[in-house]
Image (cartoon, rainbow, N blue to C red):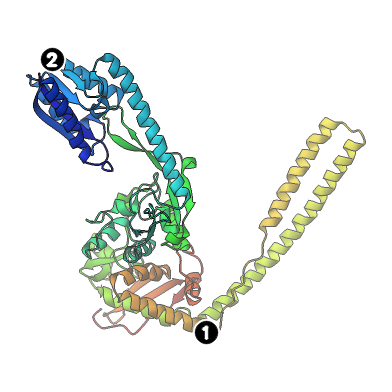
Amino acid sequence: MKTVIYARYSSNLQDARSIDDQIRLCRERSLREGWEVVDVYTDYAISGAVRERPGLNAMLARVAAGGIDQVMAEALDRIARHQADSATIFETIRFHGARVFTVADGEVNELHIGMKGTMDALFRKDQANKIRRGQAGRVAAGRIPGNICYGYRKVVRLNDRGDPELGLREIEPEQAEIIRRIYREFLAGQSALAIATRLNAEGIPSPTGRVWRSTMINGDRVRGNGILQNEIYVGVLVYGRTMMVRDPVSRRRVPKVQPRDKWQRQPVPELRIVDQADWDAVQARRAGTEGWNYRLQRRPKRMLSGLCTCGVCGGAFIITKPDRWGCGEVRSSGNCTIGRRTIHNDQLEARVLHGLQQRLLAPELVSAYVKEYHEQHARQRAQQASEADRLRRKLRDTQGRVDRLVDAIGRGADVEEVVEALKSAKDERQRLEAQLQEIDALPVIALHPNVAGDYRRNVEKLGAALNGGDAARIDAIPAVRSLIHSITLTPEPDGTGFLVDLEGRLANLIGLAMGKKPTTETAGMFLMVAEEGLEPPTPGL
């Protein structure tokens, strides 16, 4: 009887020698029976899915070619543990005139397929549940049951019995710094693709040891993975986000996202890499871009992109030549008399930084602003006080009406009619109380006498950062842009150079002077203007 032997083990955690043991048992049985072993087929560390097993598929092709009397294995579960797969393989082999024989059960028939298939499927399910239960217990003990995550390394330590403790991790300093850098650059306005491109250009290995991809940084929003979403970086171990299931059609194991209420979270503060403030800021930025089409998003190519306008026609100032700014209307419509006069990007940036440092937030300008602010504040306070008095009087009247209606019910008035009026009065009282709570005192600006000097020093630091390396410039550009509301360029009357008018956002200017990080949330509020000619015009600009 011409026989082919099939052997398999399913996990790379098993001993590869089990394949040799299976083959040895099958050969010994064949020798005793006098069967001729024609060929041997194997699958190493491959699960039971038929389409993923080249050895099994090659064996079935050999049987289909003819001349084979039986397929031999140690046990039926070596051929398949899934009921449908077992039945399909069995019927295929029988169709081509061969039989299935196992050392454990002898010749396999339909009863074996039904009973053993059911038992193997139940065993597989029970085994999976036990594995998940064991892993959940390790997570509760602060141990990591999975692979080594980027930013960490394995800790080798023995317990009291001399056995290795599994799942221990510690921070890998160099990778941790890369993670912090990714967070800084993302908060500075860089995209995941731009960050990945820069890391690849610098030859920094990715978590896979090969190239960085934007998906490694962004991750999957639903599954909560990736550098920017993995909570392990803020000291929280999350287990059970996904469960591997087998697709009934392709028979491939695929991850299925579990409901968030089934996720297991375990604090591991010793593994924190990212500050909570940076984590929260990154999540806020990601939440703000949810649903965006990234292909439609554009970031400024230069520090002053989108901020410059022409003082002659009001059109946008754009890059018209390599590293030189000019009026866009001259090129697109010809409706501007400024002509083809341009200014070099480096010179424009230098003049704007000089204006931010020397002209904006000058003491006399700050004093004038604060005086105007206090006067406006006093007017609003007076209006608020008058409105609050009116609301309090109306609230007292409403409360009196509520009290009278309650007394009327006690005296036996028509309950149905009084209750309706009482409900209306209570609603009115609640509305008035809410309006009173909304009236709050406006904050008063209090500036330190040295605030202008502090501001200039901080602008100098931004200027130095712009001239530094790529990482420093990335951090500095959004901060500088947040200080500027608009820039207007007007030709000098003598025909050479430009006058530059800079309009800044005072709230961010004062915030920078006080050491706070500027934001773009105050766009359009509290503007301060530096007069024309931030510095003497440079001939030929």
> From the viewer's perspective, is 375 left or right of 176?
right
Q: Residue at x 45, y 61 (%)?
A: 270
> Where is residue 268 shown, x and y percent of the image?
46, 56
State the image quarter where residue 34 is shown: top left
> Where is residue 444 shown, x and y percent of the image?
62, 72
Marks 2 and 1 sit apart, C-alpha to C-alpha, by: 96 Å
Quadrant containing the N terminus in the rendered view: top left
- For the residue pair 10 and 468, the one nearer the viewer reads as 10
The residue positioned farthest toward the front in the image shown: 32
Q: Is disc 2 surrounded by few (<14), some (14 to 19) or many (20+) residues within 10 Å?
A: some
Whether residue 214 is situated above or below residue 369 in the rendered picture = above
Question: What is the number of callouts on the image?
Answer: 2
Tag 1: residue type? Asn
Q: Secondary structure at mark 1?
A: loop
Tag 2: residue type? Gly
Quadrant containing the C terminus in the rendered view: bottom left
> From the viewer's perspective, is 421 left or right of 147?
right
- For the residue pair 424 and 368, the one nearer the viewer reads as 424
- Number of the label disc, if any, that sits on residue 450: 1
- For the residue pair 346 and 36, the one nearer the viewer reads as 36
Question: Dot 2 corresponds to which residue?
Answer: 97
Whether residue 19 is situated above or below residue 324 in the rendered picture = above
> Where is residue 406 shown, x and y percent of the image?
86, 40
Can residue 239 be seen in this snapshot? yes
